[in-house]
Image (cartoon, rainbow, N blue to C red):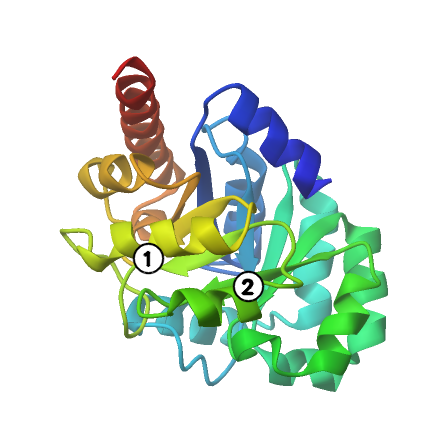
Amino acid sequence: MLRAHWAALRADRRVALIPYLTAGYPTRDASLEALGMMEAAGADLVEVGIPFSDPLADGPVIQHASQVALNGGMTVAGTLALIREASVGIPVIAFGYLNPLLRYGVERFLDDAAAAGVAGLLITDLPGQEDRALAAAVRASPLALITLVAPTTTEDRAREVLRDAEGFVYLISRLGVTGAQTTLDERVTAAVARIRRATTLPVAVGFGIAGGAQAAAAARIADGVVVGSALLRRLDAGLAAARALLHELRVALDASAAAVAGS
C-alpha cells in the first residue's frame, strides 16, 4: 500500500505532508475529528501516536499530549479503535514505543493494527531495527516497518540500517527530542544525500517543522515533511487553527516543489 502511494506522489511531483496526532489528545472525540479532517486538509499520510508514560524521544509538547491522553483513558487498543473508526482515505502510520507493544503483544498488535487499517509502524526506541525477531515479525505482516535515521548517521551505517527498511525513511532533522524550531539544521541536506545513496525509499524529514518556511526548506531536498508539536499546539486552540497550519504547510510544500521542478 505504501509503495504504491509514494509512487503516485512522486509521479505527481507532490511532497508528502505527514501530520502527527497523539491518539486521545486533547480528547478522544477531538482527536477523532482531527484525524478525520486530515485528508481534506491536504495531508498525504498521517502518523498517529500511541500514548506512552515515558516518551523519551519526545519533547514537552508531545510528552504533555501523551499524558493528557493517558489520563483520559487512551490505550493501545483505544488507539487502534480510533483509527478504525476514523477510516481515513490516506495511509495511517502507527507511531509509538516498544514497551506498550510488548505489553499488548506484538503479534496481536500487528493483526489488530492491520484490521484497523494501519499501513505502517514506526517504533521510536528500536534503533537500527536491532531486535531482528521483532523486525522480522513486522515485515511478515501487512504493516511496513518505518525506520528512523539521525542526521549524523554515516553512509555505511545507513546502508546497514536501511537494508530491510520499508515504506519510507524518517530522517530526524536534528539531534535531541521532538519540538518546533525556527530553522532547518544545515546537516539535513547532507544527511538526505547519504540516505539516498543507501536506499531508494522516499525520505521524510521530521522533528522541528513548525511552519511554512521550514516545510519549504525540507521540501527542496526531501520527499515528505512531518509536523507534530506545532500541530498539537494548534489543536489546543481548536480544529480551525490546526487546519490553518496544515493549509500553510500544504501551500509551502506545493510552492517549493513547483520551484524545484521549474529550476
Using the image, determine if residue 41 lies above or below residue 125: above
Cα separation, mark 2 vs mark 1, equals 14 Å
Q: Quadrant of the N terminus?
A: top right
Rendering coords of residue 17 (x, y %): 43, 37
Q: Is residue 184 left or right of residue 192?
A: left
Q: Nearer the viewer, residue 64 or 3?
A: 3
Residue under pointer 1: 191
For disc 2, the marked residue is: 147
Q: Residues within 10 Å of mark 2 (few under 14, many from 20)?
A: many
**Front position in the image: 20 or 6:** 6
- Identify the residue at image location x=40%, y=76%: 57
Neighbourhood count class around disc 1 (C-alpha, 10 Å): few under 14, some 14–19, many 20 upward: many
Determine the secondary structure under disc 1.
helix
Mark 2 is on which residue type?
A: Thr
Marking on residue 7: none
241 left or right, relative to 103: left
Q: Quadrant of residue 112?
A: bottom right
Q: Residue 200, position in %: x, y? A: 56, 45
